[in-house]
Amino acid sequence: MAEPNADQKIKLEQNSTSTPALGGKLLYDGYTLQWADDFNGSELNRDDWNIELHAPGWVNNELQAYVDSPENIYLENGSLVIKPIEQKNPDGTVSYTSGRVNTQNKHDFKYGIFEARIKVPEGQGFLPAFWMMPTNENLYGQWPRCGEIDIMEVLGNDTDKSYGTIHYGNPHSESQGSYQLTAGSFSEEYHNFAVEWEPGRISWYVDGCLIHTENDWYSATEGQGEITYPAPFDQPFYLILNLAVGGNWPGNPDETTDIASAALYVDYVKVYQKDSYSEDVVKPEKTVVLRDPDAEGNYIINGNFAVPESLSDQQDWTFLTALGGEAQAEISGHELHIITSSEGTVDYSVQLVQPNLPLKEGGVYQVTFDASANAPRTMKVDISAPDRSYQRYMEDTVVQLTPEVQTYTYTFTMTADDDANGRLEFNLGAAGSTAGVSLRNVSLKKIGQNDPGKEKKVVLADGNYVYNGGFQEGENRLGYWNIWKLGDSRIRVTNDNNVRRLEITAGKWTSALNPVVVYQKDLALTAGDFELSFDAEGPADKNLSVWAAGRRFQAVLNGSDTTYSYKLSLEKEPVCRDIAFVICEPGVYYIDNVRMEEDSLIKNGSFNAGFAGYELYAYTTSDVSYVVDSLNEDTAADITIQNTGDEAWKIQLKQNNIELEEGQWYRLSFQAKSSLNRPLMFAIQRDGTADNDWTPYSGETIVQLGQEYQTYEVCFQMTYPTDMKAVLSISMGAVGGEQIGQQHRICIDEIHLDKIEAPAV
């Protein structure tokens, strides 16, 4: 259960638009019961359920260890019981155990009605859940890109309210609905929780009544393409039941929590499916209406504070406090004044915002304001997306305030889709000062417009120069590819059990004079050494010609799915920058995983191609901003961290698809520094997205960063079987358990992985 952290959850509650009890009834017409467990046996059926084992703090800073114990997981009176247990440790501390079960690889389902009759525990610190995750989390990538369906979550301290949520995309996005009981509570009696999942639509029900429905989501990664809808919710998922204790969202147990009497009870789980489903669905087109600015081009309403408006009515300017923040704000004399008595624990503990700001994709915007403070101090300004999990359109920017009024101006480009609800935020919490702040003349103006449709191709974030090489993007999954054919030839992308390959049926008239050609133009190729690779299958002894940057390669097919790879060296930027597959003989051919990338073990190690080849993963996207700095640094990765989170993995610089040969020795090295002395951890490891096996081939190395560049390296032998898809991970979260809430900057450069001889003994 991957929940937003406590900070995000508070923001979600402040901007909740969920409508309780929409009222429609759950209908079973056309459905057949596919699988059920009524828990009437003497013990949990291990042929149906897996029991997960996880240490405390594994996710969401939760306190419990998930264990396989009959004291935590058992059947009683026809119900599955998951019970938390409190343990007093010799050192005087308290620890907890609990249970988590799932049906992965035993009962996996694609679409259907999934329901359970459940009674939840009451008490501060409990978070029971009935939810679903994809069987193969690697199909679309690491969470949240893989997708998650939360059917039921109920906070133990608020047991008359349930939540239903989906998580998806990168940056992390979500859609959430909730339902409030008018009488009773989910802890006093059993209630029925269900989700109806169909291609292109997911609906949540409580006791058979519709509480929320969603049909607008996406599967994408920044710097790469968007997978064809309805991904990621078009793949098999499995069921999960668990009871968490403590953590970011529910908070930890306190003196009011009665652990001894608490338990999650599940009367039954049922799954219904239709005989067939049509996946021929189209993502709904949203009409985003962007309002006009005022006569002076300003999108901020009451930016000169001429109107002494209410700051608590959720209209125009709104003043908020949270998490220990205590402050007051008022408008007078064409100024807004903020007086703080307690700064709170996070930047938005004291916050002034204006939502409903219209932002157009490709627009260049300028934020301007006058500000001063009673004493020197800082605040943060940003423009966020409340409807898109608070991703930043203008990154968090620290403003240095002085007693003298100064004018501050910041410019940013809107790179996301049109949004009618951008939000300007002034964050004054956790700044190390309670000095009063005054604001005047706030404006947001559009000063330019780029045409996003005319952008040239660049190297993708995974290092590939070929767009949609996996045939999962765009209309009919053929985005970016062009086709030339005559006669009876047919071209499509398969979708059998989520296996997508380009299928070319070359008709009887196919010949050297009448070929079938599938091609892509204008790759971002420059001078350098490259490797071209792809998977192909076709009639044995027939040929598949590939043209890349004007060079011709010929693959001799063998009747089975085979990987082909070729090296090419370009001494200068090529005149022809296209790639084309040419078929000159009749037959059925398949092509997949087309890649053109830099020919080295680590791609783009000097960051000369931006972040191409890398993924910057942040569990909380607003905690991190990053650029390739070529002004102050020699094209280094420049990563600004607001908060590390509570686990090392919550901030990572990653590169996938690294080839390691069994028995070979390697040297991994890079340069790094930090504005704040702190630890960093790095490793080359197995990709455990699908099975949670993240074996560190190089070992996990922790180093201490200083304020000057140092070179860090590790030499290791690949003692495991050859792995063509290993992962470089540089972890910048809470390394060694050290959580850092102070803003700091890490620079990384010159990442190299070299084959070496075995070191002398």
Image (cartoon, rainbow, N blue to C red):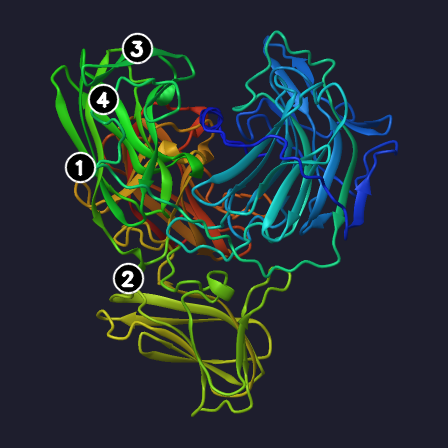
* Amino acid marked by disc 3: Thr
Q: Which residue is mark 1?
A: 296
Query: Position of 266 compared to 355: left or right?
Result: right
**Place of residue 700 in the rendered image (x, y in percent of width and height, measured from the top left):** 46, 38
Task: Say whether disc 2 or disc 1 marks the residue closer to the N-terminus.
Answer: 1
Quadrant containing the N terminus in the rendered view: top right
Q: Which mark is residue 305?
A: 4
Marks 2/3: CA–CA distance: 48 Å
Question: Does residue 105 show up?
Answer: no
**Quick one: SS at disc 4?**
loop
**Place of residue 70 in the rendered image (x, y in percent of width and height, measured from the top left):** 78, 26
Task: Say whether disc 2 or disc 3 marks the residue closer to the N-terminus.
Answer: 3
Q: Which residue is mark 2?
A: 456
**Quick one: SS at disc 1?**
loop
* Amino acid marked by disc 4: Phe
**Quick one: SS at disc 2?**
loop
- Residue at x-position 74% and y-position 54%: 274
Marks 4/2: CA–CA distance: 43 Å
**Place of residue 593 in the rendered image (x, y in percent of width and height, measured from the top left):** 48, 65
Is the residue marked by circle 1 packed among few (<14), some (14-19), or many (20+) residues within 10 Å? few
Closer to the camera: disc 3 or disc 1?
1
Write down the quadrant of residue 370 in the picture: top left
Q: Which residue is mark 3?
A: 340
* Amino acid marked by disc 2: Lys
Query: Position of 1 compared to 641: left or right?
Result: right
Closer to the camera: disc 2 or disc 3?
3
Marks 1/4: CA–CA distance: 15 Å
Is the residue marked by circle 3 packed among few (<14), some (14-19), or many (20+) residues within 10 Å? many
